[in-house]
């Protein structure tokens, strides 16, 4: 089967499905609670449920309780023990230009990379 035949077969199936589909009946829009000519209902017109307060469940109160923030300190790596390749990777990750820093083919030295990373 060629790509054109697959395309035509798919188009035929979609056409049949489209032609046999029944239109959806529109859902009626719920009537507005407040008449259009009033801006806001008066206080007596509000339902009693809206005006009564309900107690907050214990589970919801626990979820709303303040949470302690923990500060995690990540130890800095020992730059002097790293190889040049590892230092170059770290420099590239932090956006430090280590390649051709002193001209073509003259990259940063290990000490210069350590100084730039610190």
Image (cartoon, rainbow, N blue to C red):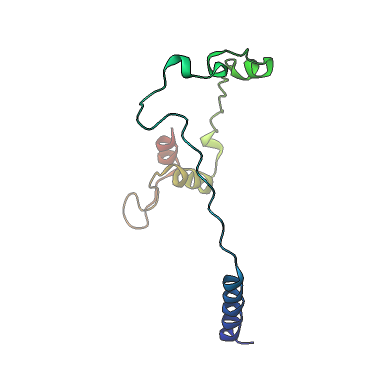
Question: What's the residue at 41%, 30% (across, down)?
Answer: 35
Quarter of the figure with the N terminus: bottom right
Residue 76 location in percent, x, y? 53, 30
Question: What's the residue at 59%, 80% (across, down)?
Answer: 12
Question: What's the residue at 48%, 37% (across, down)?
Answer: 31
Q: How many marks?
A: 0
Of residues 65 and 39, the one nearer the viewer is 39
Q: In the shown orientation, is residue 41 left or right of residue 50?
A: left
Residue 103 location in percent, x, y? 31, 54
The quadrant in which residue 56 appears is top right
Which residue is most to the left? Answer: 103
Is residue 4 positioned above or below 53 on the image? below
The quadrant in which residue 109 appears is top left
The quadrant in which residue 54 appears is top right
Quarter of the figure with the C terminus: top left
Of residues 19 and 100, the one nearer the viewer is 19
Q: In the shown orientation, is residue 113 left or right of residue 12?
A: left
Is residue 23 positioned above or below 15 on the image? above
Of residues 103 and 4, the one nearer the viewer is 4
Residue 19 location in percent, x, y? 57, 73
Residue 82 location in percent, x, y? 55, 40
Q: In the shown orientation, is residue 62 left or right of residue 32?
A: right
């Amino acid at each position: 089967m060629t790509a054109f035949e697959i395309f035509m077969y798919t188009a035929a199936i979609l056409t049949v499905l489209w032609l046999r589909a029944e239109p959806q009946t529109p859902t009626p829009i719920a009537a507005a609670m407040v008449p259009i000519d009033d801006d806001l209902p008066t206080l007596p017109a509000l339902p009693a449920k809206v005006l009564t307060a309900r107690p907050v469940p214990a589970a919801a109160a626990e979820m709303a309780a303040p949470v302690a923030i923990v500060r995690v300190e990540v130890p800095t790596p020992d730059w002097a023990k790293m190889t040049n390749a590892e230092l170059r990777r770290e420099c590239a990750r932090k956006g430090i230009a280590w390649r051709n820093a002193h001209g073509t083919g003259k990259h940063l030295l290990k000490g210069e990379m350590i100084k730039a990373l610190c």
